[in-house]
Image: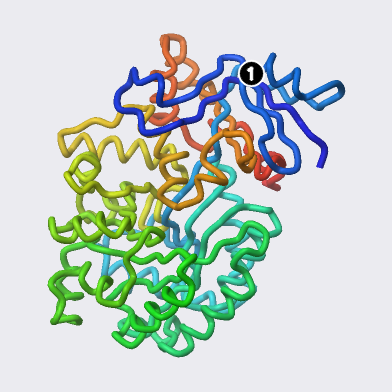
Amino acid sequence: MTSKLLRGRTLSFLRWPEAIDDHSAWRYEEDGGLLIDGGRIIAAGSYAEVLKKAGAGVETIDHRPHLILPGFLDAHVHFPQMQVIASYGAELLDWLNKYTFPEESKFQNAQHGRRIARLFLDEMLRHGTTTVAAYCSVHKSSAEAFFAESHERNMLNIAGKVMMDRNAPDGVLDTPQTGYDETKALIAEWHGKGRQLYAITPRFAITSSPEQMEMAGVLCREHPELHMQTHLSENHAEIAFTQELYPWSRDYTDVYERYGLLGKKSLFGHCIHLSEREADALSQSGSVAVFCPTSNLFLGSGLFDYQRYRRREKPLRIAAATDVGGGTNYSMLRTMDEGYKVIALNGEKLNPFQSFWQLTRGNAEALSVSDKVGTLDEGTDADIVVLDAHSTPGMRLRMETVETLAEELFLLQTLGDDRAVREVYVAGRPAKSAIVA
């Protein structure tokens, strides 16, 4: 791959911004440059400095006056649910039975899985998302389709075949043994192939028997380097049913603790209704609570207490995510717009620098991949998004009165969507412009 030099207004984060004027938390260049070679960022800084390092003849791509940021990360998505998004009128458990499980049963057809995997990753890239933590269906072929499509695009993605052996229709069930065997085979085939990473994926305690939960724990012990992803405390009826199924448990989190599923690479979707004991357990284990605001609002599940979870004496590691199809769109900009409102309903605010930290470095740290993506640091993979705050008539009009970077970011978050994403680079290659409409 030939080297290229991107020019534009570059922004990336060094740490959590404590306040809107905490300038030392981010690095911003009004006329910035990124030199890319071999899929990595090899120089970053002012355009003049980077140009000197680039040497004569390097291809320059001028994105001025647009913003250049690390590609967005999405920490919890269900790729088989693209045709479930915008389904009316149910709360979590009814919604799963009425819409989700029938839809996921279609993934018995490998060709269907390949089609949806292709369209799903198209949609992610269209919206500026370069890395996801994805749930496939229970069918091994769905994970094979996802990884094959991801690998062909050279994306860094985390995914796993769902394990579920009860409380769902036959078409979406495995067994403790087949769940284990198929997961082992997928790990052997895909984990570490190119940029692919595997996540052990028991859907949640309701759809996994104690025997399958044991198997999930065995997989985590056998492969401590892998991610584990599941759901936790999304809905009151879900919590009550879980405790009926596991009557010995102190609380919902205790089920996952018992089977050894907590840890630094453990991703727990939703985590809305945690007791203090549960929050302490997640904090002490380094587990990640994944905030899915559009889904939580759409299904009426509740309000994730983001700022309190961050500030408590034993703080939680937090990621943010679209969810899909409980969520209402594929955009991390729209996700943080709804996240802002959820946090406001809890009597707090999230400033725009904090939002964009979460979309980039924050999610990369939560997914344990910040050494590779989520920043514009030299030596990291060149997964990059270019944002245009003038992309719609309404945004152009509002930009006439915008005076600061913070105001521009908040405008992008509040009104932006896939139209605000001018280009996306995956390991240095243009990806959005390559999507066939």
Q: Is residue 287 above or below residue 406?
A: below
Labels in figure, total? 1
Residue occupying the point 46% across, 43% down: 331
Q: Is residue 186 above or below residue 36?
A: below
Quarter of the image that includes the N terminus = top right
* Image spot of residue 274 (x, y percent): 17, 58
Residue occupying the point 50% across, 29% down: 12
Q: Which residue is mark 1?
A: 64
* Image spot of residue 362 (x, y percent): 41, 41
Can you name the residue that lies furthest to the right here? 57
Residue occupying the point 68% across, 40% down: 40
- Front residue of 240 and 176: 176
Q: Quadrant of residue 247?
A: bottom left
* Image spot of residue 175 (x, y percent): 42, 89
* Image spot of residue 431 (x, y percent): 68, 43
Q: Is residue 395 above or below residue 161?
A: above
Residue occupying the point 46% across, 15% down: 399
Q: Quadrant of residue 408?
A: top left
Colour setup of the view:
rainbow
Q: Is residue 422 left or right of residue 90?
A: right
